[in-house]
Image (cartoon, coloured by chain):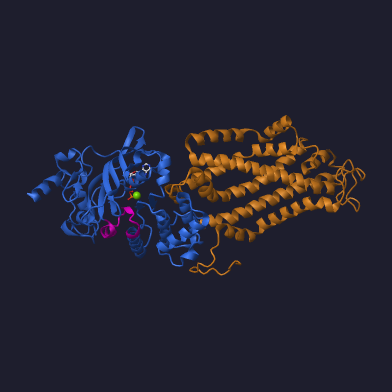
Amino acid sequence: MSGTTIPPLALSVEHLGVTLAGRDGPLPVLEDVSFGVPAGRTLALIGESGCGKSMAALALMGLLPEGLRCDTGAIRLLGEDLAVAPPARLRALRGSTLSMIFQEPMTALNPVFTVGEQIAETLRLHQGLDAAAARAGALEMLRKVEIPAAAQRLDAYPHQLSGGMRQRVMIAIALACRPRLLIADEPTTALDVTVQAQIFDLLKTLQRETGTAILLISHDLHAVADIADEVAVLYAGTCVETGPASRVLAAPEHPYTRALLACSPRLRLGAAAAGPAPDLLEVPGMVPPLGQRGPGCRFAPRCELAGADCNHPPPLRPAGAGRAAACWRVGDTTLEAVA
Amino acid sequence: MGGNRSTLPAAPAKPASPAREMLRHFLRHPAGMAGFLILLAVALASLAGPGLYGVDPADMAAAPFEPPGPEVPLGADYLGRDVLAGLLIGGRASLSVGLAAALISVLIGVAVGALAGWFGGWVDRVLMKVTEFFQVLPSLLFAMVLVTLFGASLGIITFAIGVVSWPGVARLTRAEYLRVRGLDYVRAAVAGGGRPHYLILRVVLPNALPPIIVAAALAIGVAILFEGGLSFLGLGDPNVISWGMMLGQNRTYLLDAWWAVTFPGAAIFFTVLAVSLLGEGLNDAINPRLRKRG
Ligand SMILES: Nc1ncnc2c1ncn2[C@@H]1O[C@H](COP(=O)(O)OP(=O)(O)OP(=O)(O)O)[C@@H](O)[C@H]1O
Ligand SMILES: [Mg+2]
């Protein structure tokens, strides 16, 4: 899917650090996270539960929960650094240039307004449309997200729609102002399997139409393999591997990525197929909780290849072909392979 | 156009708005409807009654302590004034003070509670300190002080009652805002770029409103009682006849003329009862919907 020329980056996250204010000083939640989403392409952020994917997404939106703050690094959206943008600027960007859809379509729509009113509201807020134009725009968006009988659904309340339809409405709201970046945090987790596939298809279609870059957070590695162009793998708040989705998923470099892929039994491609026993559905061990991360490589305690040198944190280093990995072992093997 | 009774699950024909659903529930609630009808009757009687009955309530036309009879249906008080005429006109003061004071307390309470609950932090701490201050103040005494200082006019009395009775509404509103603020659709609205005033008024308020409506209905009852209490103590507006004033003036003659005390007392009792029945009906109409929406 990815062409030979990589388009300019819509979003580039550079050395992002997020901390949680604790009693004994700030606790790192994200450390030195870097990745980029090319314009009009999809980057998938993957990793186990609790490794910081949602916090990364919220940091981009400027919506970190209370107690968390982004204190290092840059978040460049079309060149503009959001990490230092004033709140009013962020508010103007949110919902128009930068929008987000959430995991729970059942609860993410306001129960007291019709779906038409909720889509129209975004258009009025960001594009200053009058009521009639906003309503027409809302109808057009409902058609775009392929909701049957769109004209009637315009006046439906959220509780009258199914989960899949509500998520379509959320997508309509998020895309109404043609954002340059759409963040989708597990957009299909709450939906049943057939609907999940439809939603991913819809996102792909709309991306082709609007050229929106998508930052997708998902545990569904099949979907990731299917729709992502790029992948960034997070582990315990650090970025351990990035690169083109097809290559990373087929031949993971980082031991963590390898273990993660091995957990997805139907996705045994390339090197992952030769991995551990097929009945293994979990990476052994646990993600270290906040404040209990060691000084060296975060994955070392669970890693088969860990050695003494892993007591120093490995930086994210280029690993060939647009890829990068944060592992002392990776450099060795690539060098050997190249030699 | 007309409401379609049959609700086929798949047919997107006529979506029922949450507000309309609530109304439908309320109309089927016996206690709530009883309360509503009693209040309606009281309101109609006090609006149209004095004109229809045509007797001046201040006129000392009958003999003092004249018992109920064909001349004076509900008897006369110690000065020979017609109790029924007083009752009809007195409803105006009680209801208007009740409504206006409840409105004042709801406006203050919602504003304070919404700001505290939405912004949290120091805004919340300061506003809640102020709320606590008003809450621990003995409200009847405070209202008496206000009335004594500024004079016993109906406006001042209304204001005094409103000002002493908002803390409950503020706490309730704050709790609702704290609850709703964390819900997904509010986070989604924030992520959609909404400004604070838009989020507070358009996104959160309609969802926080149901318990506030119930509290407002109950506040009307409390305000009516409050006005009755002030008038009973002789702190009411001396130029306006109210049920509390009738009670207060006739209380020493209870054994000579039970009717002059009993009827105004009953009027207050039934009106306040009707208001709380109405509140109960609203509560039941609103809450099952919230539970269903989960
Ligand atoms: N509101 C919060 N306050 C403090 N810490 C939080 C908060 N929310 C999450 N965290 C912590 O931040 C870390 C990253 O959490 P995050 O929600 O980003 O994980 P995730 O990768 O999105 O997981 P999942 O796949 O389960 O959604 C976790 O250790 C979590 O405990
Ligand atoms: Mg998450």
In the displayed structure, A141 sits above or below A254; it is below
Please say whether residue A215 is one of the residues in the magenta stretch.
yes
Residue at the image position 49 percent from the left and 48 percent from the top: B180
Where is residue B169 drawn, in percent x and y? 59, 42
Tell me which corner region of the image, top left, top right, bottom left or bottom right, holds residue B158.
Answer: top right
Quarter, ligand 1: top left
Residue A219 in percent (x, y) is at 30, 55
Residue A143 at x, y percent in the picture: 43, 63
Which chain is rendered blue in the image? A
Color of chain B here?
Answer: orange
Residue A61 lies left or right of residue B50; in this view the side is left
Asked if residue B183 can be seen in this view, the reply is no
Q: What segment is highlighted magenta in the picture?
A: A208-228
How many numbered markers are drawn?
0
In this rendering, the answer to whether A253 lies above or below A71 is below
Residue at the outermost top position? B149
